[in-house]
Image (cartoon, rainbow, N blue to C red):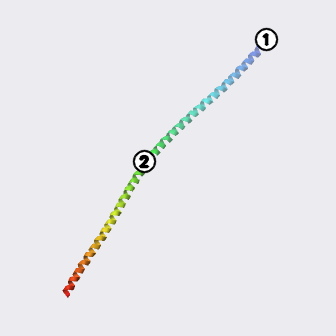
Amino acid sequence: EAAERQAAKERAAAEEARRIAAENEEAERAAAEARSGLEEEAVARRAATELAEEARSEAESLQAELEAGRAELVATASELGETRCELTMARSEQGELELARAELEASSQRTLAETLEEAATKLDSEVR
């Protein structure tokens, strides 16, 4: 009877050892899966970081292009303002030239009229 009890204890101990070994194997599998998941997460994190760096770099490049475009636009607007000013001045000068030309023409016509009148007067007096 003592031997049977001892054998039963040994069987129970062996069963307990198998159960503990199975639990250990399950725990090791879970740990391996967790490590694998952590590695995948780390890879995903590195990929996300790389993408963020690329996006940041692209945004900085686009910002630089935008600032250069703005500077070019400001320069173009300034040139346009200068051109408008020059055009206004040219139009004013053209108006002044047209006025001077008209005055010269009127003066020439007056002089011609006076000369013709003098010639007519002289011719009249000679005819008489």
Q: Upstream in the sequence, badge 2 or badge 1?
A: 1
Which kind of residue does numbered mark 1 sit on?
Answer: Ala
Extreme residue toward the bottom, this view: 128
Q: Which image quarter holds the C terminus?
A: bottom left
Q: Please indicate whether residue 86 sits to the left or right of residue 34 in the image.
A: left
Horizontal side of residue 62 vs 32, given as left or right: left
Q: Residue at the top extreme?
A: 2
Dot 1: what SS?
A: helix
Residue 125 is left or right of residue 67, and the answer is: left
Q: Residue at x 44, y 47 (%)?
A: 67
At label 1, counting other C-alpha atoms closer than 10 Å, the crowd grade (few under 14, some 14-19, many 20 or more) is few
Say what secondary structure mark 2 lies in. helix
Spatial separation of the CA atoms under disc 2 and disc 1: 97 Å
Residue 4 placement (x, y as % from top left): 79, 14
Which residue in the protein does label 1 denote?
Answer: 2
Q: Which residue is mark 2?
A: 68
Q: Give the amino acid at mark 2.
A: Ala
Left or right, residue 108 beside residue 42: left
